[in-house]
Amino acid sequence: MEPLKPEVRKRILDEHPQASPEDIEEYERLLSERFTVDPDLPMAPEVSDQRNADEERLAELYDKLFSTP
Amino acid sequence: MCPTPIITTLRPGDTTKTNPFTVVIVSNPSLEAPLNSGTFVIDPITTMQAAFNTAATRIVSALFALLPTQRERFIAHPSIGPKIRVISAFVSGLPAQQSNSLVAQDAVSTLLVARRTVFMPFLLGIGINVADVVYAVSMSETHRRASAWFTSDDDAKAGIGFTLDSGMFTHRFFNIVPGTVAIHSSTDTFTPLHEFGHALSSYSNGKVVDLYTDSGPGINNKNGRPIPPHFDSYDGTALASDLTRDGLGYPPGWSSYHCELIDPAVPAVMDNYFAAGTPEACQHDTMTRQFLMDRLRAKISR
């Protein structure tokens, strides 16, 4: 996954005072982790549940980091 | 399939092989917007052949170390580069539907995401029957970040074995699903090389993961504190850990640590190369470089 450019990271923080560097870190980690599991293999129920929870958290963070100020 | 795609061999690779190692660069006919919605629209790249050709040139330049000042040159090695075939396919005029959609727009980011299982049926339909790493180029108006899925190896077929501290693995000759990259036509010059590192790696025989976040385990990343001086052994050669993530530092709270860098002055290719100022100065860490070179050599020998 293409990394965030430093200027994009700065812009997110400048435009969204409620966002923190830790939010960006968590967001980037969850996005990147998506690609580390073969999406076409069956998942154990607990893995599937975790991935659903991760997607919900990603949606929350997306709103926090990218919603129109 | 109609109309006729424009297929160009950009590099012939090893013409003595029935199944030469092949990189395919294809224009994305149809975007799924958003991902997993079942809604498809025509990708603007389908009417922009010049932009597609420019993107293809950028991808080839990054892979084969043709960028000015580029220092990561492992694919251009004389034992590797001439053996790699590169094909571009510009496809236009197809309907916006599931079977023509190689790229989706993510709903919770500006990532372009490869719809990996569509790739081989689509490529077979335009006469391309061998693919190891495939770049699908989009001109999405809203999503510009690239992403990649690792290769799903065909573990029922042969390969060349290698060892890590954790056991024996195999650089497989063939795949079930090739490594797939979704990338924007306006990509910067270096991102294609970063995504190639992911896409060439394997779900079952070594993942090359992102190093700019607190990733889970991979061929190039481990987790734990304190960081041990020994990272791993690759085919019996001991490799040291990068104790300081030179130039960037490990943030407090991370458990990740990486293999030693070839050049400690700049981040690794799989790390945040944008932080280098000049991304072309970045090189892989020691483990990633050797792993990717051996994996390529195994595949081009098939």
Image (cartoon, coloured by chain):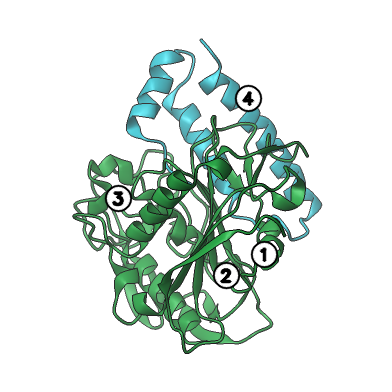
Residue B44 at x, y percent in the picture: 57, 37
Per the rendering, the colour in which chain A appears is cyan
Q: Residues within 10 Å of mark 4 (few under 14, many from 20)?
A: few
Q: Which residue is mark 3?
A: B245
Relative placement, left or right, of B145 versus B283 is right
Please name the residue shown 60% across and 58% down the image.
B5
Q: Nearer the viewer, mark 3 or mark 4?
A: 4
Residue B64 at x, y percent in the picture: 33, 65
Image quadrant assignment for residue A8: top left
Q: Quadrant of the N terminus of chain B?
A: bottom right
Q: Which residue is mark 2?
A: B131
* Three-letter code for the amino acid on which mark 2 is drawn: Ala
Q: Is residue B300 above or below residue B26?
A: below
Per the rendering, the colour in which chain B appears is green
Helix, strand or loop for disc 4:
helix
Cα separation, mark 3 vs mark 4, equals 30 Å
Q: Nearer the viewer, mark 1 or mark 4?
A: 1
Please name the residue shown 48% across and 65% down the image.
B8
Numbered circle sitting on residue B120: 1
Q: Which residue is mark 4?
A: A60
